Amino acid sequence: MIFISVALVLLVLGIYDVFSENKILKENILKGIVVFLILFLGTRGFLGWDWYFYYPSFMNSAYTYEKGYMFYTFLIKGIFKNYIFYQFITTMIDFIVLYFVFKKYCKYPIMAFAIFFSLQGLHIEVELLRNMKAIVLFLFSMRYIEERKVIPFLSLNLLGILFHTSAVLYLPMYFILNYNYKNKVVIGAFILGSIYYILDFKFFHLIFQLDYAFLPEVLESKLLNYKEVIPKELMRGVNLFYLERAIVFFLAYNYEKNRIIKNSAYVWIGIFLFTSELSIVSLRVGILFTYGAWLVLTRAIENVENKKVLIGIIWVLCLGRIYKSITFPGNKINYRYKNAIFNELDYEKREQELIESKKYLKESYGKELLIQY
């Protein structure tokens, strides 16, 4: 599997980043990684699931999205109406922003890219083109939370909303992420969330059993439609996803000194523990804060006494994550990498493959495109 191989190489280079003192070589490796990922994913062709909607949207506006995203695609299409060119430009923007963000916040940015790639980053970059723009705009705006400059913060995130409406959740983060929460509140919330998740309580399922006839017809229809896509069976308990959050929580609580990054990780963990039964909503909201895990895991290496143990844990988490997602039956079909430069793209063939792969979605326990949280 090419993606597992890439993840493995990035993790090996991440070890070099941690233990080498050769700053010039490490910077060259970092820039090489950015260039490689731009070329590798920017020329990916019809990879994944969501290209099925974004390709016709780009070529002939068959699907319409937020106005900012549509204007963005219009500008690129005005330069060159070619979907691979569009993929390349949008991927290049994302990784250039990530390069500067990881350089700013992480002593080991190569390791940050390794963790990013394995921990949802690959799937977010491939599938969620609009969400990713909102995420990188927020990451770029985090400095203005620290500097308490509300105007540039709002400007960047209002722009993010024009790419994906879920970015509206970033607006209150100007206050939420900068607040110094008491330790007993943080610990209490994590314990309560852990009990809720491990014992598989389903408060939201009870809410969806209510009668919504008193609501306006449009809202009632949306709630009923959403009720149909909530998985009736969802494996929860002490699993890989919970252990991953528990490790990130431990590292954030004990080692993270940046309040904004620490609280970002707490938000990511809280969304998972308290709302995972909602599947799609939990996933789509949770990915907005996955960066908290990327940064906490990377930055913790700077502060722990035994770096080798933590790196070993990170390796297990990353390789377990990337293996579990890529070997999902639907992804075995849709994540067959064919570089658009060296292979002729066959829309009809990929369309049939994607239709075939949808029969496996039920096995993903309703976690839809990214397959896992």
Image (cartoon, helix red, strand yellow):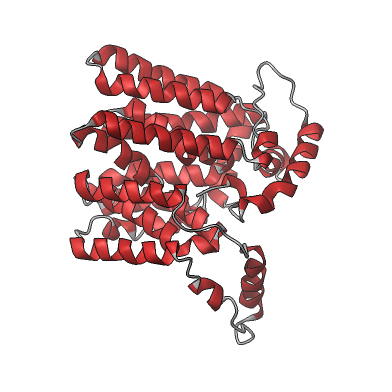
Viewed as shown, does residue 85 lie left or right of 313? right
Q: Does 110 sit above or below residue 64?
A: above
Viewed as shown, does residue 217 lie left or right of 69? right
Give the farthest residue toward the bottom.
214
Viewed as shown, does residue 122 lie left or right of 1? left
Specify whether residue 178 is in view: yes
**307 or 74: which is nearer to us?**
307
Q: Position of residue 303 (x, y in %)?
A: 19, 36
Specify whether residue 105 is in view: no
Q: Does 28 sit above or below residue 338?
A: above
**66 or 266: which is nearer to us?**
266
Residue in the picture at 48% in, 41% down: 120
Residue 181, quarter of picture? bottom left
Viewed as shown, does residue 225 lie left or right of 235? right
Q: Position of residue 297 (x, y in %)?
A: 32, 39
**94 or 209: which is nearer to us?**
209
Residue 81, quarter of picture? top right
**56 or 346: which is nearer to us?**
346
